[in-house]
Image: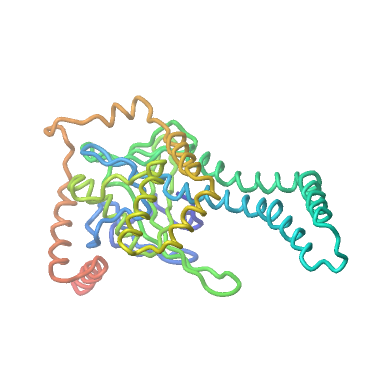
Amino acid sequence: MAKKTEDADFDLKTQRPSAGEMRSFATGQALFLAPLPLPTGHAPMDLGGSFLEVNDTYLDVGQSNFNKAFQVQLMIWGLMSVLIVCFLVFPLIVLSGAIGDPHERPFMTHVMYAVEGLEFIATELGLTILFIGVLCVLPVIRTTLQKARTRPMRFNRQRREVCYFPSGSDEPIIQPWEELVAWVSVSTGTTGEGIMSTYTLGMALDNPKTDKTHFLNQGVLTPAHGLSKWEAIRVYMEKGPAFCPGKAPYEGRHTFDEERESMREAYRCGYCSAFGVAFWYVRNVVTWWRFPYWVAEWDHSYSMKPMPASIEQWSQPLPPEQWAKPSSALLAQTAEIEKAFAKGLSFMGYFNSTLGETESI
């Protein structure tokens, strides 16, 4: 989750927000969803595959290796494009000069020209090609190392607490679930060519030891996507794993086998042409077959940092009689907003109507 500029505009200590509150900042607005996490009326969805573990005790929300194989394929495709042009296309262009040569030089002369060109590429341009290869590899490694510095955010539904590790730290921050601050924000900026809007699902936790607030933000496609992801987290904490999306699949060599079988099935059913099948094989041969999916497996195993022993103990299941209970305030407000949903009101519609009633009193 990337930090956004609007964090500095949220004064969460002296002006504690509440669910349904709208707050403006320098570049846009934010709709707060918690503390006191109420139903949003949206369908729970884990878009982007960030639910790393879902069980009856806790939910881990972090970064999966989704699209890691595709990132590696792009890297290899860029490198192979340079190599194909240098060592295949260039010699073929030189050799094609033998056709219709006005000087009628022997074919072997053109072969020698091609060999000399390859020698020049291998020696004089070798370092340049190597540099291009390094530039292609660095983003793949950098993203994995960045992900390895962070642990997932763990939501313990039996204790009704949230555990978060700041980036690069082994010191956990544990906060009550009902005190977690969450919001969906819309930021507007200019690119020089036009106006661009970005949408964010944000959360904030207070560290009582350092008196510091940690902000976590994740970009979403639309505010509705952010509301659906938050609703998936909320419904897990309030109702359990049966009501929220399951654990996101991770990419690996098995993904390659599944994609190949899916392509073959599409061909058998007539949804894919012979050209499409040939292109699939050529594309994967050029991008080194299973290698990208092996890198995805490495990314998954390397970046999944284990939890400290104290948090593993904190994550152990509790007897049902020891489970923490929701507050009476949360239960009362949840019942009220669910009645409003049954009448056709939206999340914002409920709070707008409540505000109108308050102003009329």
Relative to residue 197, is residue 116 drawn left or right? right
What scheme was used to colour the molecule? rainbow
Q: Is the residue 173 above or below the residue 271 in the image? A: above
- Front-most of 238 and 332? 238
User: Residue 355: x, y in percent?
Assistant: 24, 69
Q: Position of residue 206 (x, y in %)?
A: 38, 43
- Residue at left offset 43%, top offset 45%: 65
Residue at 23% x, 56% y: name it: 38
Left or right, 360 with reference to 264: left
In which quadrant of the rendered view does residue 224 lie? bottom left
Query: Between 198 and 50, which is closer to the camera in this rendering?
Result: 50
Lateral position of residue 230 relative to residue 277, left or right? left
Residue in the picture at 33% in, 30% down: 311
Where does residue 156 sit, x and y in percent of width and height?
A: 26, 38
Number of numbered discs:
0
Residue at horizontal 74 percent and vertical 48 percent from the top = 128
In the picture as drawn, the residue positioned furthest to the right comes out as: 103
Look at the picture and state if 311 lies above or below 229: above
Q: Quadrant of residue 267?
A: bottom left
Q: Position of residue 268 (x, y in %)?
A: 32, 58
Q: Where does the C terminus fall, quadrant-wise?
A: bottom left
Quarter of the figure with residue 318: top left
Identify which residue, 279 or 302, lies in the foreground: 279
